[in-house]
Image: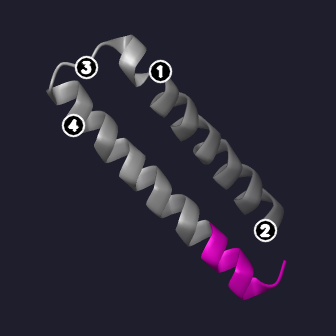
Amino acid sequence: MDRSAYRREVERLLAQIDEWTRELQVLRAYGARAAALRDRKKDLRHARMELAVLTAAGS
């Protein structure tokens, strides 16, 4: 992966993580139950792991 593709992918993952984190905060504020948050939390964990793997490989 070239440097610009790496940068775009990192930026995409960071934006996705930020968006999903905010979504979870709003859902929690409105009293969403744990079951309703499960899929979004799983997606968020996956995106964070993907970012960790990408940045570790890019170092």
Q: Amino acid at mark 2?
A: Gly
| Picture residue at 56% right of the left edge, 29% below the top | 42
Which is the main secondary structure of the residues drawn in magenta? helix
Q: N-terminal of the two: label 1 or label 4?
A: 4
Q: Residues within 10 Å of mark 2 (few under 14, many from 20)?
A: few
Q: Secondary structure at mark 2?
A: helix
Residue 55 in the image: x percent, y percent?
71, 61
Instruction: Let me know if residue 37 appears in the view.
Output: yes
Q: Earlier in the sequence, mark 2 or mark 1?
A: 1
Determine whether 7 is above or below 52 in the image.
Answer: below
Residue identifier under label 1:
38
Q: Which residue is mark 4?
A: 26
Q: Is residue 42 above or below residue 9?
A: above
Q: Evaluate if marks 1 and 3 touch, with contact meaning CB atoms under 8 Å apart.
A: no
Circles 1 and 4: CB atoms closer than 8 Å? no
Magenta part of the protein: which range?
Answer: 1-9
- Name the amino acid, label 3: Ala
| Camera-side mark, 2 or 4 | 4
In x, y percent, where is residue 21? 37, 43
Which quarter of the figure is the C terminus placed in?
A: bottom right
Q: Which residue matches tag 3? A: 32
Residue 58 — which label?
2
Secondary structure beneath dot 1 equals helix
Q: Which marked residue is nearer to the observer: mark 2 or mark 3?
A: 3
Work out whether mark 2 precedes mark 3 in sequence or the reverse, and give the earlier one. Answer: 3
Residue 19 horizontal side relative to residue 42, left or right:
left
The reply to whether discs 4 and 3 touch (Cβ–Cβ < 8 Å) is: no
Q: Amino acid at mark 4?
A: Val
Q: Quadrant of the N terminus?
A: bottom right
